[in-house]
Image (tube, coloured by chain):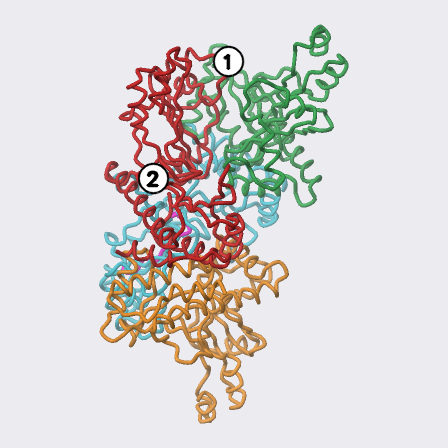
Chain colours: A orange, B red, C cyan, D green
């Protein structure tokens, strides 16, 4: 679809293709490299701009190898920090485009930042506290030898996600993401049966078991909730979340096919 | 038994009756008021000395009402702090005895402490950091109006303990404490079947699931482990522990009657 | 000047008057109420927009009483927190203007924030950690009864500033702010003698005494440095800063009339 | 004196020579190696027991090289941690003596600790939090290559002590330690003129300047106070303390010969 749209744009009125790497509201990942190939196949000059705010340090991501022009991320997801820093990775082509761009810019006004960064400083007040935290987080994520640690970080998230999905499958509830090849390693959206108010279930789980789930957004509001499995977590914490959801579903009168907790335990102890 | 022993001690060679309020190594509580009644019934002058290190702020305890002479406790259990402070509550009778005592004393040399405490200071370097922490912990434990908070703290521990015991019962494994009327609200000792090395099971649970259980001590070493349910915890955390134990038991080849996780979930969501 | 410029703007092409309450780069405060009076005297509809990033909780500031339309501030100065939250106070008139404004907006797109705030939530990820910190900071700033604490906070900053200025005066160095009636209670800019590189002095003070001063910005770069006296500080800390500067000036060959440290000590112990 | 006393003890009724390495109440250090030589010269079997609670990681100390039998220290001084851990270093000879000793022992009952330490564990609840802190503190104290860092740590304390003493000398007040060869690098005791209540001066310094000094103990109570210069401090912090004391002395009507603050500044900026 992207290739077709770009080919049809013979006047190059489209300036950029914007893609979310890991879609937080639904639990779906995008194939960024494939988007790049579509742009290239269309021989279109549009920039490729990617939001990997919730994907970075959870799912594999390669700014350079995948030909991304601008990557945006933040501290508060896979980097396991409070909110307070965001990051831009910028290609030479994007820098060029930035110089010619006439729209007002704030976060994407890179010149001053690049100039100051040469000396190790920032043009404005940096969030020094989070930079210290980032240093520790990267030590955890990259591990001792860098590459192995990063691969282990991605594998860990895939394993966590599979364990949680095994619970949802056992319950007999649909996973919102319809295509198993693009399941998110970060979160899983769970569709509730007709007639069940997902936000009422979330409220029970929160008030009874002190466990906070993400709400359905936009047109699935009230129809689903989101179970996170990212960052500073582990298998027992995820089993606890699955147990909270299972108890909350039962208290809400939802009929479950089988125990999701047992499914997750079987998965994690296999 | 205590009454009989004291009555037999006609020369008053026994100076003190020492009791543990909550026995950490086995998960058994003692009826302190009954011990006091036994001492009084024997008309014996022995002091009543009680260790409530792991019981304080978990199980009901009343130094004055129960006629205890010296109570010893510490920061690192129900008070939810790191180790680093211990506490003595001392009756007038114990203070008198202390003045006449000829054994070398260190922690129980109270005179200097009492003298300095009048001015709000300590004779030696106090652990100021933990005193700040203690202030926060007491706000949590006592709640806004003091009494209600403390009762809620005790009820919370009883509920946690019952939930964990429901899991052990579902597994079909014996609880070490043989008398239900003195079950500990702080921890539960679980006896493993003959032929199973409890410490090997603990090792699997620790290494596979990052969950650390207490070992069996003394003559039950290798025969049992201890599951804690105290302090800064909640129902989901306890379900996670129960799940870790259930997975570890299965991985160790222990046959379980039913799912303890389901039993705990049923208990906590009833 | 503002009144004259606005009167001359008969077509109302000027949409807003933007003023900095406490000018961090120079150590000068602005009389915000006077700016409001000038706008009113000119009978001009321009909005009054005020940056009190470094002034809030240091110098008296009254968004409503002074008729400000938009106030902008942040967490990292007088509120004594890490950077990571900024604040907007918005008048009804500014809200109206916002609805008609056609420029792209990000931080100043208030509708969604106002809508969500009704329920106590945020439209985007809030910096929860800093909200907890803000709660503690406000307890410190407002004191037990609110008003008295705030007045004491302002008085404290005025006293700190006067103590530091007494040191600069004793050295015989000019204060950058030429008008004593608008001295900043937050920082003091110090002009160095001709031929002295202020940044070289700053480097000596930083490397020898671990004390970091603000650099001169723009056209006074290399001619001055800035001494801060705000937030979580006290008289001894300020004397230490004054001592570091005095030692650094001497090591740089700057002739000083008298001891600034003694002047500050005399001021603070009077 | 020690040698003479030990030679006179022909029945070996003296079991141990107990020495304080750095005397916190007076600011005097002891020559531990010389004490060892005296014991050896007397050919006496007494153990050499040393308290280096406030000396460790401030002043050079060599348990093995100086032939100490038991060294006692703690976390809360040169190791820059809260109170909560203490340490024993024990010679083979002391271990042997411990086995034969019949006095009740608690902290010095080493057998169980040594047995458990082989496996990396403790016989009782360890202060895990402080062990993490100790790890960081040792990284600071030992530096990257261990030896150089330790030498720098000792040199730093000597420099701090000399700077503070230069202030006391400038004031014209006597330093309590009468022998310059045994000045403490950790603290300096300052004797006040006749008729001045040292504790009243301390109170003024504390209440007016938020700076807490050590009180005189025993027979010098009210005659002197103690200025610390150890651990996590630096030259500016010490100048601030000197300034607080100088202001407090003046407010108390003590006549000072010269400015101690200037003397310390001259010393630290030389």
**Extreme residue in the front direction:** B194
* Left or right for D156, reference B140: right
Q: Nearer the viewer, residue A173 or D8?
A: A173
Vertical placement of residue C224 versus D159, above or below: below
Point out residue C206 in the picture as x, y percentages from the top left corner.
58, 45
- The chain under label 2 reads B
Measure how far apart labels 1 and 2 are at the Cα level. 56 Å
> Camera-side residue: C170 or A83?
A83
Classify 10 Å Cα crowding around label 1: few (below 14), some (14-19), many (20 and above). few
SS for dot 1: helix
Q: Which mark is on residue B179?
A: 2
Q: Is residue A76 above or below residue D233?
A: below
Residue at image x 24%, y 65%?
A252
Task: Count the labels in the image.
Answer: 2
Quadrant location, the N terminus of chain D: top right
What residue lies at 65% left-to-right and 28% top-to-bottom? D90
The residue lying at 35 percent from left, 48 percent from top is B165
Place of residue D117 in the rendered image (x, y in percent of width and height, measured from the top left) = 60, 38
Q: Does residue A42 lie above or below B200 as drawn? A: below
Per the image, label 2 sits on a secondary structure element best described as loop
Percent coordinates x, y for residue A4 in the rendering: 45, 92
Q: Which residue is mark 1?
A: D218
> Which residues make up the magenta segment?
C69-79
């Amino acid at each position: 679809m992207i290739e077709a749209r770009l080919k049809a744009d013979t006047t190059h009125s489209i300036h950029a293709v914007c893609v979310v790497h890991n879609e937080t509201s639904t639990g779906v990942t995008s194939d960024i490299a494939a988007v790049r190939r579509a742009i290239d196949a269309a021989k279109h000059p549009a920039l490729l701009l990617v939001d990997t705010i919730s994907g970075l340090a959870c799912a594999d991501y390669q700014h350079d190898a995948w030909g991304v022009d601008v990557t945006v991320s933040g501290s508060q997801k896979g980097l396991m920090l409070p909110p307070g820093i965001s990051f831009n990775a910028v290609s030479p082509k994007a820098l060029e485009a930035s110089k010619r761009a006439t729209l007002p810019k704030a976060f994407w006004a890179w010149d001053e930042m690049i100039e100051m960064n040469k000396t190790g400083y920032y043009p404005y007040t940096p969030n020094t506290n989070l930079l210290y935290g980032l240093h520790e987080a990267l030590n955890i994520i990259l591990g001792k030898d860098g590459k192995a640690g990063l691969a282990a970080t991605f594998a860990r998230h895939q394993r966590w996600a599979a364990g949680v999905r095994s619970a949802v499958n056992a319950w007999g509830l649909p996973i919102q993401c319809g295509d198993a090849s693009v399941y998110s390693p970060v979160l899983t959206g769970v569709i509730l049966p007709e007639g069940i108010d997902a936000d009422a279930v979330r409220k029970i789980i929160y008030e009874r078991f002190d466990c906070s789930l993400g709400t359905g957004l936009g047109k699935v509001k009230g129809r689903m909730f989101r179970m996170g499995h990212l960052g500073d977590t582990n298998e027992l914490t995820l089993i606890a979340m699955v147990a909270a959801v299972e108890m909350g579903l039962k208290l809400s009168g939802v009929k479950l096919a089988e125990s999701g907790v047992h499914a997750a335990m079987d998965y994690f102890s296999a």
